[in-house]
Every structure is written in C-alpha cells, then in structure tokens.
Amino acid sequence: MEEWFISITAAILIFVGLAIVFGLLLGYAAVRFKVEGNPMAEQIDKILPQTQCGQCTFPGCKPYAEALAKGETEVNLCIPGGTDTMILISEITGLEPKEVEVTEAEHKPKETAFIDEDVCIGCVLCIKACPVDAILGATKLMHTVIQSECTGCDKCAPVCPVDCIDMRAPPVSLENWQWPEPTIKSEGEAK
C-alpha cells in the first residue's frame, strides 16, 4: 500500500476513535449531571400565553411560572391570560382562585404598535425592547412591526427617542369585527 493511504486511514481512525470517546463522555455527563427542573413550573409555563409582557411584574412568563410553583406569588397576575388561565393555574398549584387584576388597559380594545417609517431613524432601541421580536429592521434603516406577532405590551414606545411608535387598534375588517358590547339604559335614560 501507498504511504499516503496509510496515513489518511490512521488519521480517520484517530478522529473516529476520539469522536466515540468524547461522545461517550458527553453522554455520561448528560446523565450524571442532569439538572431537574420543577415539573409544576413547566406545566404552568405551558399554560401561560408567552407574551413576555411583564404585566405580572415578572420579566417574563417563565419566571412567573417558577414563582407560582414555589408559592411566592398570586395566581391572578397574568392579565393577557385572563380568567381561564388563572383558573388553570389555581388547579395546578392548589392555590385559591382570585379575580384577575382589572386594569384600565383591559377595557380598551387590543392595540398593537405602529411605526411611522418616515420618522424612524433606525436606532434599534425598540427591537431590543420588544419581548416577542415583533419589530423588524436594521441599524440606521427604518423599522416595521409584524402585526400578527405584536402582543401590544407597549414596551417599545417609551424607548423610542423620536417618538415614532404609536399604539393603535388594528383597522376593523371582516376578520376582526365584533358586535359592540350591549349597554343597559337606566330608567331615566329610557324615557
């Protein structure tokens, strides 16, 4: 056999041997040093809406789920999840269900961010502030919002130095039109 063939074969065998050894070491380390998460926190995190809005005073849904699993917080802080999510959380944790914290923002229709692209300077501060990556753009170029991804958390508007971000309700179309809430007239107004 030729000398180059022997050296290539030896190199391949050495690399395959090293790959097998390191693979076995990594497999052993994954089993030996496995970190178990809190299964209750994982279950709660799956129920939460994953908007990462911070309305619950936690930086995201995962930290809120972990605090709930430890019993360190109330079950009614997830505003976007609403009453249904709160009831599911209380069933999992065994904590007493409470009314969801009603805020002024709940009575308004869902709003999403709109960027005035003529005014945008491309500073990327809004992109860094968006917890769901709904803002698209690059440095020193205009930005835009992916409306289907925007959760309306309003974290992008305060950081904008040129005030080009507005929170607006989406335009009414056949897909999002709803009946208006019924109003009950008092006896004095009915006459």
Image (tube, rainbow, N blue to C red):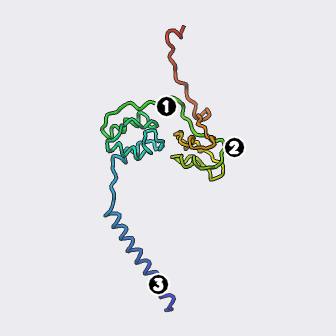
Nearer the camera: disc 3 or disc 1: 1
Question: In the rendered view, does 150 fall on the left or right side of 11?
Answer: right
In the figure, residue 175 lies in which quadrant? top right
Residue at coordinates 33% horizontally, 50% vertically from top-left?
A: 38
Q: Earlier in the sequence, mark 1 or mark 2?
A: 1
Q: Quick check: 172 above or below 92?
A: above
Q: Which residue is painted at 32% across and 62% down in the image? A: 33
Question: What residue is shown with label 2?
Answer: 118
Residue 56: quarter of image:
top left
SS label for mark 2? loop
Residue 9's tag is 3
Contact between marks 3 and 1 (CB within 8 A): the answer is no
Cα separation, mark 2 vs mark 3, equals: 63 Å
Q: Position of residue 134 (x, y in %)?
A: 56, 46
Crowd tier of the residue under label 3, counting other residues whose Cα lies within 10 Å: few below 14, some 14–19, many 20 or above: few
Mark 1 lies on a secondary structure that is: helix
Spatial separation of the CA atoms under disc 3 and disc 1 = 69 Å
- Disc sitting over residue 106 in the figure: 1
Q: Earlier in the sequence, mark 3 or mark 1?
A: 3
Determine crowd level at label 2: few under 14, some 14-19, many 20+ residues with C-alpha closer than 10 A. few
Residue type pointed to by label 3: Thr
- Most foreground residue, 185 or 160: 160
- Report the amino acid beneath label 2: Asp
